[in-house]
Amino acid sequence: MSAQHVLIVEDSLVYRRLLSRMLTQWGYIVSEAENGVAALTILENQPISLVISDWEMPEMNGLTLCREVRRRQFGHYVYLILLTAREDPGDVTQGFDAGADDFLSKPVDQSELRARLHAGARILSLEADLAARNTRLSEALRQIEQDLELAARIQQSVLPAHQLRHQGFFSDWIFLPSAWVSGDIFNVFPLGDRLGFYCVDVSGHGVGAAMMSLAVARQFLHGRAVERFLFSADNQPASPAQVVTILNSRFCSNETEIVSYFTLIYGVIDLATGEGKLCQAGHPTPFIISPEGGVRPVGSGGAPVGLIDDLSWTDVNFSLAPGERLCLFSDGITECENLNGEQFGEARLQRCLQDGVTLSLPTLLAQFAGQLTRWRNDADREPQAMADDVSLLIIERTGDSDEN
């Protein structure tokens, strides 16, 4: 172990040299200063962590030196021992308030000084160990943040493109995760002569929910490209309720090795006629908004997926006329609370989308995201993250059959 470096601050040359000789004999490296001003100059240029300072000194006394050391900070902790002939308990309190760590009465007793120096060295060792641990924790936190940022990019890559067109249909969305990664996931994709879509909200938050959401997305990808359980025997899109039943059996049997459950909307729309059907499994009930601002719900409830095996679900039929919009959302919107604890609610969501029926989807969604963010936050306070993941997917039948 290397010798401890001690700075002695004392205006009396004789007493300073006496202390210096004593500490040198004990194996310490010693520097000297005649007052607080000189001591600060030494501390700024040398990594000294132990200081023994007289209280009464010209130019800058020990009390002011303590305050300056605590104010300036030198990149490491400095242990300060004040020497004083004062006996008033109030002086000791004043010294502690200024930043002193310990006190010794003058004249100094050698054994007591040695004991106090050993105590200071132990505390400095603990401080150094704590600093090293904090450094390692900071490095680990940076690595975790980098990993989460990468995971967020991977999750974003699974989402559909913005402003997506499929023949006479146009879709767009907003996605506001409550953390780096989200338990919400959704997609819109061609399915033969139909348009398939799903919205998922996994229970919980964070990495576990995000991994589960990706597992569900993977099932839908395999269901149309590999195992093709999204299709029936005649190669037509399978009943949404049948697909949900298959997913439930798989997640209940832990084929995915992830134990959780999720709410789900899965449906298909005929690209030629606008006729569609969907299955609602615990997810908030979607609704259709007409060009005139009318609202009609589409759904029949149903249990979440992955909770109980051998459940069944039913399909709900709907139709999208030209200009109508199918709105699918997670409960992160309706349950979003303002600073007074009031929830945003489904009625407010519907009114916002009704008021924007004449706006293009990208404009409407950007406007709504701003409204929800303002609802969540107070302009005079620090912005808050969403308490739950927020997703809103809107599919509009434009009546235009172009693929552009």
Image (tube, grey):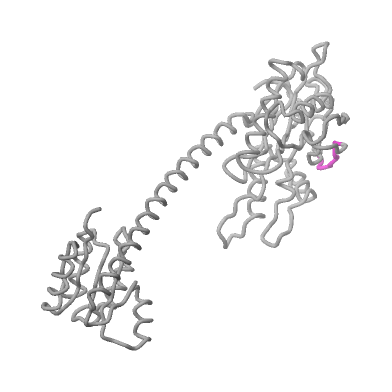
Quadrant of the image occupied by residue 238: top right
Compared across the picture, whether 25 is left or right of 228 comes to left
Between 117 and 324, the residue placed more toward the observer is: 117
Compared across the picture, whether 46 is left or right of 164 comes to left
Prevailing secondary structure class for the magenta stretch in the rendered image = loop
Residue 84 belongs to magenta span:
no
**Image: magenta residue range:** 292-299
- The image position of residue 245, as x and y in percent, is 82, 27
Q: Residue furthest top?
A: 234
- The image position of residue 182, as x and y in percent, is 63, 40
Between 324 and 193, the residue placed more toward the observer is: 193
Q: Residue furthest bottom?
A: 88
Between 347 and 44, the residue placed more toward the observer is: 44
Quadrant including the C terminus? top right
Compared across the picture, whether 242 is left or right of 204 comes to right
Instruction: Name above or below for residue 359 compared with residue 397.
Output: below
Instruction: Name above or below for residue 320 compared with residue 61.
Output: above
Residue 294 belongs to magenta span:
yes
- Note whether residue 361 is visible: yes
Quadrant of the image occupied by residue 88: bottom left
